[in-house]
Image (cartoon, rainbow, N blue to C red):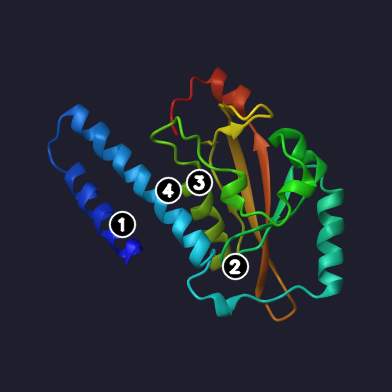
Amino acid sequence: MQRFILRENLKKFRACLGADVADTERTYLLQQIRSIQRELALLNAAALGAQRYPIEFGFLSTRDRSLFHRLTETAAEPTMIIDPRAGMRILDVNEAHTAITYTERRKVTGERLFDVFPDNPGLEDATGVASLFDSIRIAARGRCQHAMKAQRYDLRGSDGRFLERYWQTVSVPILNDEAQLVCILHQARDVTETMGAAGFTGH
């Protein structure tokens, strides 16, 4: 019911954007839309994961788990393995990933993705969570990798304060021998310096 209400409100606010509205009202509507999109992403991630039907998910064999562990270890890029099922928990990360995210492998493994990487609460129109969820969902449902354009997604620093960050990411679906989705391999590149030099202002 909550998701239904949020979706209906999203339709209403989007319809209002199509009208001739003042700049202040347009800003308010955009903030409401982004807030609803974030809440929907969190609800869907917790209840359904990246797919519409959980029965579509497969499971990793011991051999597969060993393979993906080695893949994470040997990847030069910051890499994270995500369980696409309800909760969307982090299965593993490599050292390159923990180095740029101020996290510890033992502390994030097994935790929900968006608990570890929430939106910056001080940024009303943050779209990091919603955009990342959409990217993972597209990769999961389409069974093909999905690359995100540069996206602002602030990061909680070692002192707990949020730091402004921009990322380019790719999500790759990993299938088992039965062509069932078992996990998402997610890689991220910090492009903050590049976007700052370009005067990027989007969220």
The reply to whether callout 4 and callout 1 are in contact (CB within 8 Å) is no
Helix, strand or loop at mark 4: helix
Residue corresponding to mark 1: 6
Whole-Å distance between the Cαs marked 4 and 2? 18 Å
> Quick check: 66 left or right of 158?
right
Q: Amino acid at mark 4?
A: Arg
The first of marks 3 and 1 along the sequence is: 1
Residue 117, how many percent across, how many down?
A: 59, 43
- Indicate the quadrant containing the C terminus: top left, top right, bottom left or bottom right: top left
**Where does label 4 land, which residue?**
38
* Callouts 4 and 3 close, C-beta under 8 Å: yes
Going by the numbered disc 3, the residue's amino acid type is: Val
Query: Percent position (x, y) of residue 116?
Result: 62, 45
Nearest to the observer: residue 191 or residue 7: 7
Tally the marks. Answer: 4
Left or right? Give the position of 90 relative to 149. right
> If the image is split into quadrants, where does the N terminus sit?
bottom left
